[in-house]
């Protein structure tokens, strides 16, 4: 069990990649603080971990609000004693060009996908410093490294995540805090189906287009969770400031 005795805080934990990572980290011995806007689904994940003998709590949190982030971290420290792993995974997408995108949608995507990393890291890093180190993992995207059509604000936000990750790695490496990000390709989650809906495309056709990559399929949440486990564990002890691409070869032909 690679995470025995450690505490992980995971946002976007009620479904998709966050849920898969929470379940995997719990199986690997970590206690889990779960955060999401979907209270019913989040409580179910916490109950699933508890039924398997793990330790977890769920807190309904808007990660774009400083007060919510502070409340979440305070509860994690109070109930679990420390935070060794912060997985900034919460994210949303709006598929539109800059001409079709509303200002409210721009602000919300940037707040959830980027500002939340700043807010939670600001709360968690002092605790990691006191305990001698830790690891922060941010969810970026393949579209943080290469552009995509009708995804202007999403690409902007995920590109920001990649460079924020690198800047934080420089700032906090001396305190033994490693900071990395994962760049998933299309993954079989509710968000992928939401993209099809936003674009007005039929679901099966959209998924078939998403699978056009060297491995010939989209990824699973569990596969992305394995990448998060690598970055959270001692297996990546000399890895910081990296953007780990997990996309079935989707970017393999990019410059």
Image: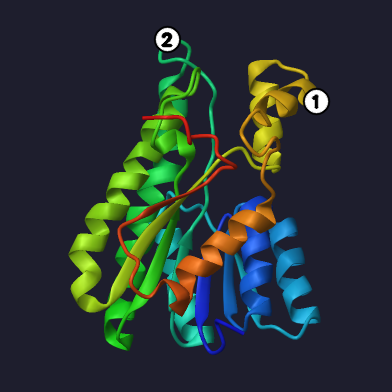
The reply to whether residue 72 is in sight is no
The reply to whether residue 198 is in sight is yes
Q: Quadrant of the C terminus?
A: top left
Residue depicted at 40% across the width and 60% down the height? 67
Q: Residues within 10 Å of mark 2 (few under 14, many from 20)?
A: few
Q: How many marks?
A: 2
Of labels 2 and 1, the one closer to you: 1
Q: Which residue is mark 2?
A: 99
SS at circle 2: loop
Query: Looking at the image, is mark 2 or mark 1 earlier in the sequence?
Result: 2
Q: Position of residue 13 (x, y in %)?
A: 62, 59
Q: Position of residue 148 (x, y in %)?
A: 47, 23
In the image, taking residue 244 as reference, residue 31 lies left or right, namely: right
Q: Quadrant of the N terminus?
A: bottom right
Q: Position of residue 133 (x, y in %)?
A: 32, 80
Depth check: give the residue in front, 57 or 84: 84
Q: Position of residue 11 (x, y in %)?
A: 53, 59
Residue with the most extreme top position: 99
Residue depicted at 42% across the width and 26% down the height? 147
Instruction: Find residue 204 and name its label.
Output: 1
Q: Is residue 125 above or below residue 78?
A: above
Location of residue 168 (image quadrant): bottom left
In the image, taking residue 99 as reference, residue 167 lies left or right, namely: left
Q: Residues within 10 Å of mark 1 (few under 14, many from 20)?
A: few
């Amino acid at each position: 069990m690679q995470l025995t005795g450690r505490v992980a805080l995971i946002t976007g934990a009620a479904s998709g990649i966050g849920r898969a990572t929470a379940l995997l980290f719990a199986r690997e011995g970590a206690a889990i603080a779960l955060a999401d806007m979907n209270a019913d689904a989040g409580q179910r994940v916490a109950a699933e971990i508890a039924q398997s003998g793990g330790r977890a709590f769920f807190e309904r949190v808007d990660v774009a609000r400083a007060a919510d982030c502070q409340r979440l971290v305070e509860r994690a420290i109070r109930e679990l004693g420390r935070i060794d792993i912060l997985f900034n995974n919460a994210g949303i997408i709006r598929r539109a060009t800059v001409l079709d995108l509303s200002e409210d949608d721009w602000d919300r995507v940037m707040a959830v996908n980027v500002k939340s990393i700043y807010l939670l890291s600001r709360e968690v890093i002092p605790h990691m410093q006191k305990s001698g180190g830790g690891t922060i993992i941010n969810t970026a995207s393949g579209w943080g490294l290469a552009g995509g059509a009708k995804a202007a604000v999403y690409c902007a936000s995920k590109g920001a995540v990649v460079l924020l990750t690198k800047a934080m790695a420089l700032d906090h490496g001396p305190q033994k805090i490693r900071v990395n990000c994962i760049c998933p390709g299309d993954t079989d989650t509710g968000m992928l189906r939401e993209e099809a809906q936003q674009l007005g495309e039929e679901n099966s056709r959209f998924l078939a287009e998403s699978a056009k990559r060297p491995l010939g399929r989209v990824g699973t949440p569990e596969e992305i969770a394995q990448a998060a486990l690598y970055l959270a564990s001692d297996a990546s002890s000399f890895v910081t400031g990296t953007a780990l691409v997990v996309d079935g070869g989707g970017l393999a032909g990019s410059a």
